[in-house]
Image (cartoon, rainbow, N blue to C red):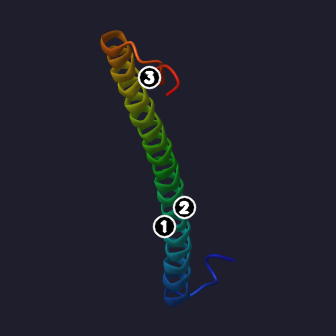
């Protein structure tokens, strides 16, 4: 069958195969890049949430230390309630 095809037909067939392989390769690359990008974005968002929670906890800790010092100095019980 291959010998019965003309040179022109063999060339077009070879180019078609190369085109299909190239298209599949590019599609796979784009999908992989999207997957990696989404995974990276998810990790960054998770770390930003943790960073915000740590900032909030640090703020509360500093406020508690401040109230503790005020209580020790002033002996006022209003600093125990906050």
Element type where label 1 sits in the image: helix
3 in relation to 32, above or below:
below
Query: What residue is at 54 percent from the left and 61 percent from the top?
Result: 31
Instruction: Between label 3 and label 1, give the one nearer the viewer.
Output: 3
Decide: marks 2, 1 in contact (CB < 8 A)?
no
Is disc 2 surrounded by few (<14), some (14 to 19) or many (20+) residues within 10 Å?
A: few
Disc 3 designates what residue? Answer: 79
Could you give the CA–CA distance between mark 3 and mark 1, rounded to whole angstroms? 65 Å
Q: Position of residue 19 (x, y in %)?
A: 50, 76
Q: Residue at x 61, y 77 (%)?
A: 3
The quarter of the picture where the N terminus appears is bottom right
Left/right placement of residue 41 relative to residue 71 reads right
Q: Which residue is mark 2?
A: 31
| Place of residue 38 in the rendered image (x, y in percent of width and height, measured from the top left) | 52, 55
Q: CA distance from mark 2 to mark 1?
A: 9 Å
Q: Give the image location of residue 24, x and y in percent.
A: 56, 67
What residue would you read off at disc 1? 26
């Amino acid at each position: 069958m291959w010998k019965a095809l003309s040179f022109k037909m063999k060339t077009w067939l070879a180019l078609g195969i190369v085109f299909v392989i190239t298209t599949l390769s590019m599609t796979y690359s784009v999908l992989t890049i999207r997957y990696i990008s989404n995974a990276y974005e998810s990790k960054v968002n998770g770390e930003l949430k943790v960073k915000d929670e740590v900032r909030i906890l640090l703020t509360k800790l500093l406020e508690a230390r401040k109230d503790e010092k005020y209580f020790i100095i002033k002996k006022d019980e209003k600093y125990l309630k906050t």
